[in-house]
């Protein structure tokens, strides 16, 4: 009887772990509209415009690149 109970507990733990890992791996739901992208004037990396630091008409991905300016 104790072995059967232990077997059921082990199966329940495995089931719980599988369900928990499946919940974490699901992608976030789509919002419907794609976010506008921009390109860093220093390094050329593309990233969401909402995360950009702008100076004039140029967008930068971080404060360091904004400070360094346009790479020639």
Image (tube, helix red, strand yellow):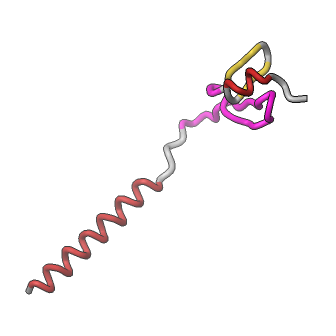
- Estimate the x, y position of residue 57 in percent, counting from the top left: 79, 16
- Estimate the x, y position of residue 58 in percent, counting from the top left: 79, 20
On screen, residue 55 versus residue 19, left or right, reads right
- Estimate the x, y position of residue 39 in percent, counting from the top left: 77, 31
Quadrant that contains the C terminus:
top right
Query: Which residue is rendered at x = 68% and y = 21% of the image?
Result: 53
Quadrant that contains the N terminus:
bottom left
Q: Nearer the viewer, residue 71 or 20?
A: 71
On screen, residue 15 versus residue 44, left or right, reads left
Query: Which residue is rendered at x = 40% and y = 55% of the image?
Result: 23
Question: What is the count of numbered marks?
Answer: 0
Rendering quarter of residue 40? top right
Query: Which residue is rendered at x = 10% and y = 84% of the image?
Result: 2
Query: Which residue is rendered at x = 47% and y = 53% of the image?
Result: 26
- Estimate the x, y position of residue 29 in percent, counting from the top left: 49, 43
Rendering quarter of residue 50? top right
Q: Residue furthest right?
A: 72
Q: Residue furthest top?
A: 56
Q: Is residue 52 above or below residue 23?
A: above
Q: Is residue 9 above or below residue 16?
A: below
In the image, the segment drawn in magenta is: 31-51
Q: Is residue 45 magenta?
A: yes
Q: Is residue 56 above or below residue 32?
A: above
On screen, residue 27 versus residue 13, left or right, reads right
């Amino acid at each position: 009887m104790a072995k059967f109970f232990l077997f059921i507990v082990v199966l329940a733990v495995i089931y719980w772990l599988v369900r928990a890992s499946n919940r974490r791996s699901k992608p976030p739901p789509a919002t419907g509209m794609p976010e506008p992208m921009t390109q860093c004037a220093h390094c050329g990396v593309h990233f969401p415009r909402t995360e950009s630091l702008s100076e004039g008409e140029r967008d930068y991905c971080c404060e360091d690149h904004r400070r360094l300016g346009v790479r020639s």
